[in-house]
Amino acid sequence: MGTVIFVSAGPGAADLITLRGARALARADVVLADALADPQLRELAPDARWIAVGKRGFEHSAKQTEINALLVRMAREHAVVVRLKGGDASVFGRLEEELLALQQAGIASEVVPGVTAALAAAAQAQRPLTRRGRGRSVSLTTAMTEAHELQAARSADTEVFYMAGRQLAALGRQLLGAGWPADTPTLVVSRAGCADAITSEHRVAELAAAALLHRGRPTVVTVGAGAAALGSCRAASTASPKIEVLPTPAPGLARA
Ligand code: SAH
């Protein structure tokens, strides 16, 4: 009977995995990998059988059940099984179901933390998620529910929405409905942490304008204090609708 190590792969660029995660991959006999993980991570697990199990978008429960069963079977047949998940395994990663399946089968597990998309986006745009005095709380929210309905609220000074890429217009409307002022700064970052990341800045009322720019890419939307320009004492306000594409900071992500 083996151990399953849940390794957080980071937001998509291979070099944003942790050292601990890389070491777990080096020991792996089998890797069950998510779709968002950088294929370059395979190089860190030269001896492992690599099985792609994840898919982009909403995972159906049937599919999740199959992944749970595969995980248990692999752990019974191998010493070290790595379950590689995009971003941080604990954030919108269906970790609960998989941990529970292992627990019920009496299989030992370990979780290695990683860089979640909200943090990668903040680093990409160089907009700190917390701000002294005015950005005291951060909430991570999925824009998707089981019923595929969009739900947005105003529960923290800074709110980061995952899985909102396909419905930016609806998200903007919901945010206004939830009480965010129309000129609330909003940052949209797709493929954060990757060499081809795109960052754009909007007022909440014009969020729809970001849809085309980020279409088809994994995207997070940061709303409120953590999206504000550096040094602005509150929500940055612009008189006219504006899409500002921020220059991508020097990536330092030279790909091999
Ligand atoms: N566990 C992951 C989240 C999985 S849900 C994490 O911690 O980041 C998938 C959603 O994550 C996507 O719809 C998108 O909203 C976000 N996401 C993942 N990678 C991203 C990236 N590189 N840039 C921006 N958003 C990303």
Image (tube, helix red, strand yellow):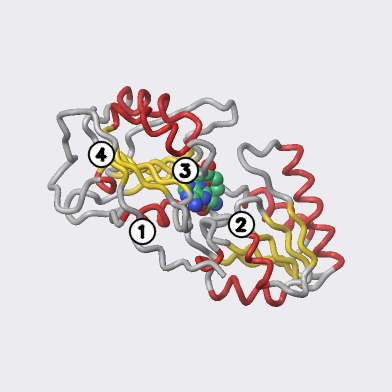
Towards the viewer: 173 or 89: 173
Using the numbered discs, state the Cα–Cα distance from disc 3 to disc 4 in whole angstroms: 16 Å
Q: Earlier in the sequence, mark 3 or mark 4?
A: 4
Q: Determine the image quadrant of residue 176.
A: top left
Can residue 91 be seen here? The reply is no
Percent of width and height locating residue 21: 59, 70
**Disc 3 residue type (three-letter):** Thr
Q: Determine the image quadrant of residue 185.
A: top left
Q: Secondary structure at mark 1?
A: helix
Packing grade of label 3 (10 A; few <14, some 14-19, many >=20) is many
Q: Secondary structure at mark 3?
A: strand
The residue labelled by disc 4 is 185
Q: Earlier in the sequence, mark 4 or mark 2?
A: 2
**Disc 2 residue type (three-letter):** Ala
Percent of width and height locating residue 65: 76, 44
The residue labelled by disc 1 is 123
Percent of width and height locating residue 174: 37, 25
Q: Is mark 3 within 8 Å of ligand 1?
A: yes
Mark drawn on residue 219 = 3
The residue labelled by disc 2 is 37
**Disc 4 residue type (three-letter):** Pro
Q: Earlier in the sequence, mark 1 or mark 4?
A: 1
Total marks placed: 4
Packing grade of label 1 (10 A; few <14, some 14-19, many >=20) is some
Q: Earlier in the sequence, mark 2 or mark 1?
A: 2
